[in-house]
Amino acid sequence: MAQLPQIRVPATYLRGGTSKGVFFRLEDLPELARMPGPARDALLQRVIGSPDPYGKQIDGMGGATSSTSKTVIVSRSSRPDHDVDYLFGQVAIDQAFVDWSGNCGNLSAAVGPFAIAGGLIDPARLPRDGIATVRIWQANIGKTIIAHVPMTGGAVQETGDFELDGVTFPAAEVQLEFMDPAAEEEGAGGAMFPTGNLVDDLEVPGVGTLKATMINAGIPTIFVEASAIGYTGTELQDAINSDAKALAMLETIRAHGALRMGLIGSLDEIATRQHTPKVAFVARPADYVASSGKPVTAGDVDLLVRAMSMGKLHHAMMGTAAVAIGTAAAIPGTLVNMAAGGGERQAVCFGHPSGTLRVGAEAALVDGTWTVTKAIMSRSARVLMEGWVRVPAG
């Protein structure tokens, strides 16, 4: 058998929010991987260590969870009023595909810092000290993200005292603005509410008829009431992820919601669309103890949310799902808004398995249609390792 040498590709391993992934400059990728297609997907899978029937990603950079099986490609933008283009690839763990159907809101926080450090931003636009504004084109969903990145001494400031539940150590705060976050998903007609309703009756065989808010904002998300599926909204990961019956039920809800939203044409398509849509359940505030041992009281939050990602309950909250939560909370009549007490609001603080998170959204009713101009939240980011990642040639 011929022995193939390893090739090395410049890469940076970054944490962004409560996720981490391998970041590449487009120009540094092998030539065949600079264009979308099988060569690019194969490279990224091998980098992460997929497909892995053991589900561990031992022979790669992935961490065998939805939060750590991630890749990012960044390039200078050819679009006016943007600095960089950002493409996100969610690598399946035990299957051979990369899902390009949505964004990662958490890793969005690391795109600005990576672009600055990688020389992709015009130096004339960067302050030596202060806040750098990086205008990002999110290529997966065709949306603009504005990142406000702290700078000290001409370099990205990574350390600080900003604390983010789900991340062990404090770091510097990176503020993100997700502009016009209603997703323009294929098959959904670009509508924030693809069914035309704030709440639908969603028929799910074997589960029943559930009240559901299905929204395209940040990432397509299906919200149901926790009580309708036997939960309180205070659950931690083990309560869901160790229950095969619960996981199957939630995946069935996700499949039927995706079909109702027009994101898939038949139920069997959901197997190759792991990243989107998300399914989440909401509840009124209640006391619970977060996964870190930190107590969260009902008075700390406006509502409780638990969200599924890649078939498992997320350990905290996906950034894009937080955008969906903030957007839906700002619109009276959605299940999210009602769980938060109803009425008009511009920000919401919700409880998740790791603690709490605040997200804001600016919503307005224009000619009978709800529009959201932007959603706002704070994350943090930090370089974990930089250099080259190695993969076998071929």
Image: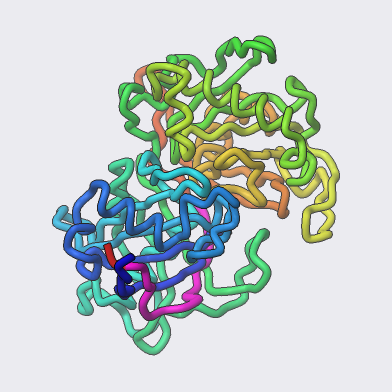
Residue 106's x, y, as percent? 50, 55
How would you classify the magenta stretch by its main secondary structure?
Answer: strand
Task: Please determine whether, in this image, residue 332 is positioned above or below residue 211.
Answer: below
Indicate yes or no whether the magenta region holds residue 5.
no
Residue 204's x, y, as percent? 61, 13
Task: Residue at 42% x, 45% y: name it.
Answer: 96
Q: How is the image coloured?
A: rainbow
Quadrant (top left, top right, bottom left, bottom right) of the C terminus:
bottom left
Task: Residue at 59% x, 57% y: name it.
Answer: 56
Task: Residue at 58% x, 32% y: name it.
Answer: 279
Question: What count of labels does the image hold?
Answer: 0
366 and 297: which one is in front? 297
35 and 222: which one is in front? 35
Task: Please determine whether, in this image, residue 206 is positioned above or below residue 185.
Answer: above
Indicate yes or no whether the magenta region holds residue 383.
yes
Which quarter of the figure has residue 190?
top left
Q: Which portion, as a residue range, is magenta?
A: 377-392
Residue 23's x, y, as percent? 38, 65
Horizontally, residue 387 falls left or right of residue 37, namely right
Horizontally, residue 116 falls left or right of residue 81, namely right
Question: Which residue is outermost to the bottom?
Answer: 153
The reply to whether residue 363 is visible in this rendering is: no
Quadrant (top left, top right, bottom left, bottom right) of the N terminus:
bottom left
Task: Please determine whether, in this image, residue 356 is positioned above or below residue 127.
Answer: above
Which quarter of the figure has residue 160?
bottom right
The reply to whether residue 349 is visible in this rendering is: yes
Horizontally, residue 166 falls left or right of residue 272, namely right
Residue 30's x, y, as percent? 22, 65
383 and 12: which one is in front? 12
Task: Residue at 37% x, 84% y: name it.
Answer: 155
